[in-house]
Image: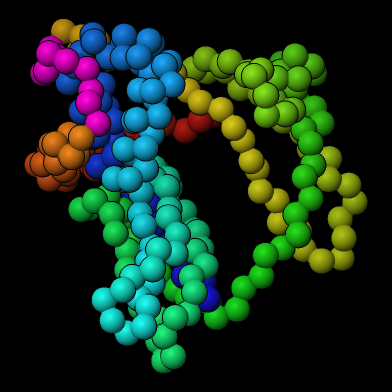
């Protein structure tokens, strides 16, 4: 069966990332992001720690006892918009399915949970990027070459820039078609001036349960005011 969620993150992971990881060390975060995280060891250590501690793990009870079998894991999706996602889980008991969700306290906002006894995995067809137009509506072949495949070439953008991407899936069939937009890349985080002038610690971020506990403690204190300010100051892309 499939367990279907409608959810989004709280701002806990925002506190962890911006305040604990980047804000508290102040100017030291420049070297941490620009140099240390460019090394394989520290980058893998941070990624593995975040994967173990954040997100949501899904387990199913086996045999009617205390044995719980891992069934899936959801990554953090951010606090801005609701996300619908399904996790396929095995049916291990004769008369019921018991599902356990594990995640840091208050890391998720869950709007709805439903189950589906039947599901299918549709056959997908990949349509490559056909054309990219810049903000002046002119074809940008350099941008298309950077985004047409997963490789070492990236299209670098700055605030205020935008472009149009065109795909050509061909004539529509009689049945309804659903399209998913897949992308790959990263962004470089900027360090605020207030962080540089008023650091709270004398070292760069160290992945640990202590850091996560500090993030949870700060989130509990600032939750109401931070959520209200966040929702009131969201800026549209265009």
Q: Is residue 212 magenta?
A: no
Residue 128 visible in the displayed image: yes
Image x and y of residue 47, in percent: 38, 34
Number of marks in picture: 0
Q: Main secondary structure of the magenta part?
A: loop
Left or right of 132 on screen, residue 195: left
In this rendered view, identify the residue nearer to me: 3 or 50. Answer: 50
In this rendered view, identify the residue nearer to me: 64 or 29. Answer: 64
> Considering only vertical position in the picture, is 236 above or below 74?
above
Query: Residue at 67% of width from left, 29% of height from top?
Result: 150
Left or right of 229 on screen, residue 63: right
Query: Residue at 67% of width from left, 65% of height from top?
Result: 121
Q: For residue 50, what is the image quadrant?
A: top left
Left or right of 136 on screen, residue 186: left
Image x and y of residue 207, in percent: 24, 31
Residue 99 visible in the displayed image: no
The span shown in magenta is 198-207
Query: Residue at 44% of width from left, 64% of height from top?
Result: 71
Query: Residue at 70% of width from left, 51% of height from top?
Result: 179
Image x and y of residue 2, in percent: 51, 71
Q: For residue 232, what is the image quadrant?
A: top left
> Considering only vertical position in the picture, is 42 above or below 63?
above
> Considering only vertical position in the picture, is 94 above or below 14?
below
């Amino acid at each position: 069966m499939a367990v279907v969620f409608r959810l989004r993150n709280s701002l806990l992971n925002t506190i962890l990332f911006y305040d604990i990881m980047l804000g508290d060390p102040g100017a030291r975060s420049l070297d941490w992001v620009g140099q240390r995280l460019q090394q394989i060891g520290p980058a893998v250590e941070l990624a593995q720690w975040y994967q173990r501690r954040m997100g949501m793990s899904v387990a199913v009870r086996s045999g009617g006892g205390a044995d719980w079998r891992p069934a899936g894991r959801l990554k953090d999706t951010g606090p801005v918009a609701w996300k619908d996602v399904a996790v396929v889980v095995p049916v291990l008991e004769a008369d019921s399915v018991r599902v356990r969700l594990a995640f840091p306290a208050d890391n998720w906002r869950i709007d709805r949970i439903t189950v589906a006894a039947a599901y299918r995995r549709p056959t997908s067809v990949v349509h490559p990027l056909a054309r990219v137009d810049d903000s002046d509506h002119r074809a940008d072949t350099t941008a298309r070459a950077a985004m047409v495949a997963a490789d070492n070439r990236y299209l670098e953008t700055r605030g205020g820039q935008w472009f149009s991407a065109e795909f050509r899936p061909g004539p529509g069939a009689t049945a309804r078609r659903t399209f998913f937009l897949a992308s790959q890349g990263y962004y470089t985080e900027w360090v605020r001036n207030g962080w540089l002038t008023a650091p709270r610690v004398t070292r760069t971020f160290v992945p640990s349960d202590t850091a996560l506990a500090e993030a949870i403690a700060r989130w509990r204190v600032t939750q109401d005011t931070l959520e209200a300010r966040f929702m009131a100051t969201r800026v549209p892309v265009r």
